[in-house]
Amino acid sequence: MNHTDQTLTSFEHTFIGVYLIVSGILTTFLNLIGLVVYWRFPRLLCTPSAIPEIALLLADLAASGLNPFSGAAALQNRWIWDDHAGCQLYAFFGFVFGDFQVLCIPFLAFDRYIITAENSALRKYRTRKTYSKLLLLLIAYSLFWSVTPLLGWASFAKTAPGIVCTINWMKVDVSFVSYLTAKFIASFMASLVISMIFYRKAIRLVHKNRAREIHWCRKKSIRFVSFGCMFSTYLSFAIYATVCMWAIIAGPQTIPRIFNALPAVWVKLAGIFNPIFFVYYNPRLWACTKKMFGLNYDNEQMHRDKTEERIWMDSPRNTARSIRTSHDPVDTTHVVLHPADNE
């Protein structure tokens, strides 16, 4: 069947517009809470693990900043921003933030496996210096896949409903096919496979009672949390791959009209589910969140492992001032730069 009419009804435009605006508000709220928790409890939470965790929260927050633009366009039943510069910038930033969200998942899986393994040879790499370099590498990798369409490898364009600008799957040529194939293998599938390997190793260690005490999830729910952490992002972005592959195999004109708008809607779920699985299913982060709001919390989660490096304690002076001699389970001292944590 040839779906030549790619336009949406007025109701569909309104529904998508409201959804994009509401999901943007919810994403902003959830991710901001996660970031504030790190700011309030830096000495307890700011281990090297905080680098990929905070990076993911910031990526979700940045991606939600695009929602008002696509939401307003949907409510107006057309793309209301500049057709060239506005469209290209929207697509570029959407790809930068989206790619970085995807790449943070294997980074976190790698970190969590190291935390879980009792005697991992990889433990020496769990440092602020190494993680900072890895973070910069992932940012550069995201920029590469986002800049190349601007330079002629594939292209960005408005989708048929005029809600968002993204990769132009309506123009199926050699450039588009080669770009999509390379990106699908080197970015999406590679990060998915790496994540699955490290989470599978962590799950096996827990089930064989060979794991350390972990704080990123409760051991009894490690399987659920691991799959949730992976597929909260990968399932959200999989619809993009589905639509692009559909365009290559059957032709862009055969794509049902609602599927031209679905990627813009579906991908926003990542920003909502990421803080749920990465923050609120994390017992230590959840305890800190409840403490911040004055609710009852698990006091056992407030113990700090003093053998872990603190990523915001550079100078010997700050490090010396942070050393405690007591074993008070509630961590009340910290660097002067973070007065909000003094309680």
Image (cartoon, rainbow, N blue to C red):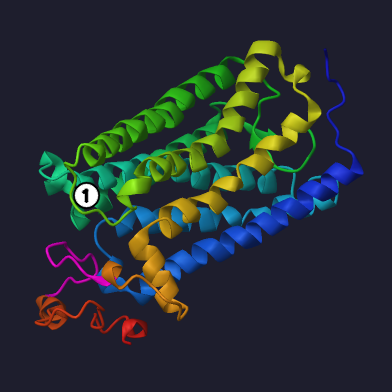
The percent coordinates of residue 175 (x first, y second) are: 56, 19
**Residue at x-position 50% and y-position 20%:** 181
**Residue 157 visible in this rendered orientation of the protein:** yes
- Frontmost residue, 302 versus 176: 302
Q: Which residue is disc 1 drawn over?
A: 115
- Frontmost residue, 58 versus 113: 113
Query: Considering the image in quadrants, where does the C terminus appear?
Result: bottom left
Identity, as a three-letter code, of the amino acid under mark 1:
Ile
Name the side, left or right, on which 329 lies relative to 216: left
Residue found at the far right of this picture: 10
**Residue 140 visible in this rendered orientation of the protein:** no
Does 247 sit above or below residue 13?
above
To which quarter of the image does residue 104 belong?
top left
- Frontmost residue, 311 versus 180: 311
**Residue at x-position 22% and y-position 49%:** 115
Magenta-colored stretch includes residue 306: yes
The secondary structure that dominates the magenta segment is loop
**Residue at x-position 41% and y-position 65%:** 286
| First to last magenta residue range | 302-315
The percent coordinates of residue 133 (x first, y second) are: 25, 49
Name the side, left or right, on which 50 lies relative to 245: left
Magenta-colored stretch includes residue 15: no
- Frontmost residue, 80 versus 267: 267
Q: Residues within 10 Å of mark 1 (few under 14, many from 20)?
A: many
**Residue at x-position 67% and y-position 46%:** 85
The percent coordinates of residue 68 (x first, y second) are: 70, 57
The percent coordinates of residue 237 (x first, y second) are: 55, 36
Name the side, left or right, on which 49 lies relative to 255: left
